[in-house]
Image (cartoon, helix red, strand yellow):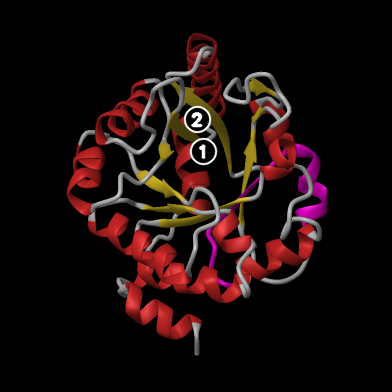
C-alpha cells in the first residue's frame, strides 16, 4: 500500500502530461534569513503557483503561512534538513523535521540536503538512508538535494555531479536535485548514469534572464526531468512570468528564445 501512496503523491508534484516538474525551493530562510522575495510567503507562493509551478519546498514552520486557501493549487514539499550560514561548517546538514511531521502537515513529498564530499558526509549518508527507509514505509516521495561540496571539490564537474546524483538513487531517493555541469553532453551523461529523475538546481542569482532560461533549455535537452530553481524565480522582477517561462521549456518543449519573448512581452 505504501507504493500506491507514494505513486499518488508523486502525481501531485510531477506534471502528468509532460512527466516533468517545476519545483520552486523556498527553504532559504533557515540558511540565509529573511532574504528578498521570501518575506510575504502567501504572496510569493501564490505568484509561482499562478505561473504553473508544480511544487514549492518550505520548512515545517512556514507551511501554515504558505497555505493560502485560495488561488491555484501547488504541491507541498517539506524540507527536513537545516544549517545556517553562521555555522562553523555550513556544509553540515542536520535533521530538523521528520517524515511523520511532514505527513501531519499535509506534505506531498519531503526533501533532504546532502553534501557529498563534505567533512560530515558519513553522518549525512546515514540520514539519507534512514529517511529513505521511512519514506518507503509511509509512501512518501523523497527529493534528495545532492551537491558535491567539500575542500578541493569542483561542484560543477561531471565526475562530481554524476557521483552525487548516483548516490541519491543508490540510497533510496525518488528524485535527485543537483548542479548543472555547464553543457548538454556532460549533463546527459549525468542523467544516463542516474536511474531516477534528475532535476537541475538554480544555484545563486544569475546575471540575466537569458542565462537562466538557456540553462533550463540545455538541461532539458540533456534529459533532465525538470528544475528546482529558487532565487532566480522568487527574486525575479516578475516571479509569475518567470515561472511560466521556465514551465514553457520544461512542459511545452519551448526553446529559451520563445520563453524569453514571453517573459518580456
Badge 2 element = helix
Q: Please tell me the numbered disc located at residue 2.
A: 2
Left or right: where does residue 72 sit relative to residue 21?
Answer: right
Badge 1 element = helix
Q: Given contact means CB atoms under 8 Å apart, are the residues at marks 1 and 2 in contact?
A: yes
Residue 34 spot, x, y in % from top left:
79, 49
- The one nearer the camera, 165 or 102, is 165
Residue shown at 45%/67% (left/top)? 246
Residue shown at 39%/47% (left/top)? 199
Whether residue 52 is in magenta: the answer is yes
Residue 51 spot, x, y in % from top left:
57, 72
- The one nearer the camera, 80 or 115, is 115
Residue 11 spot, x, y in % from top left:
47, 52
Name the image quarter holding residue 104.
Answer: top right
Residue shown at 73%/37% (left/top)? 30
Res. 109 visible in picture: yes
Start-end of magenta stretch: 51-68
Q: Please tell me the numbered disc located at residue 5.
A: 1
Q: Does residue 151 lie above or below 178 as drawn?
A: above
Left or right: where does residue 187 sit relative to residue 70?
Answer: left
Residue at the front extreme of this rendering: 152
Mark 1 nearby-residue class (10 Å; few <14, some 14–19, many ≥20): some
Left or right: where does residue 58 sit relative to residue 203?
Answer: right
Residue 130 spot, x, y in % from top left:
53, 15
- The one nearer the camera, 212 or 97, is 212
Amino acid at each position: 500500500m505504501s507504493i500506491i501512496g507514494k505513486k499518488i503523491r508523486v502525481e501531485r508534484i510531477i506534471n502528468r502530461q509532460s512527466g516533468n516538474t517545476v519545483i520552486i525551493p523556498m527553504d532559504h530562510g533557515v540558511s540565509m534569513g529573511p532574504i528578498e522575495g521570501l518575506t510575504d510567503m502567501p504572496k510569493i507562493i501564490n505568484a509561482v503557483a499562478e505561473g504553473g509551478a508544480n511544487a514549492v519546498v518550505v520548512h515545517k514552520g512556514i507551511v501554515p503561512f504558505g497555505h493560502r486557501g485560495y488561488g491555484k493549487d501547488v504541491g507541498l514539499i517539506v524540507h527536513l534538513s537545516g544549517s545556517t550560514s553562521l555555522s562553523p561548517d555550513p556544509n553540515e546538514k542536520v535533521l530538523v523535521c521528520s517524515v511523520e511531521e511532514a505527513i501531519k502537515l499535509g506534505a506531498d513529498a519531503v526533501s533532504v540536503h546532502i553534501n557529498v564530499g563534505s567533512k560530515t558526509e558519513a553522518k549525512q549518508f546515514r540520514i539519507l538512508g534512514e529517511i529513505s527507509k521511512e519514506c518507503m514505509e509511509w509512501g512518501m516521495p523523497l527529493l534528495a538535494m545532492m551537491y558535491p561540496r567539500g575542500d578541493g571539490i569542483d561542484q560543477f564537474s561531471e565526475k562530481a555531479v554524476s557521483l552525487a546524483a548516483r548516490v541519491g538513487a543508490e540510497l533510496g531517493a525518488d528524485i535527485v536535485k543537483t548542479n548543472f555541469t555547464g553543457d548538454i553532453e556532460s549533463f546527459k551523461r549525468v542523467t544516463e548514469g542516474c536511474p531516477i529523475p534528475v532535476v537541475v538546481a538554480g544555484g545563486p542569482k544569475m546575471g540575466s534572464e537569458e542565462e537562466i532560461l538557456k540553462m533550463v533549455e540545455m538541461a532539458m535537452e540533456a534529459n533532465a526531468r525538470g528544475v528546482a530553481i529558487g532565487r532566480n524565480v522568487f527574486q525575479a522582477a516578475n516571479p509569475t512570468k518567470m515561472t511560466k517561462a521556465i514551465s514553457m521549456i520544461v512542459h511545452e518543449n519551448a526553446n529559451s528564445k520563445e520563453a524569453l519573448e514571453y517573459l518580456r512581452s
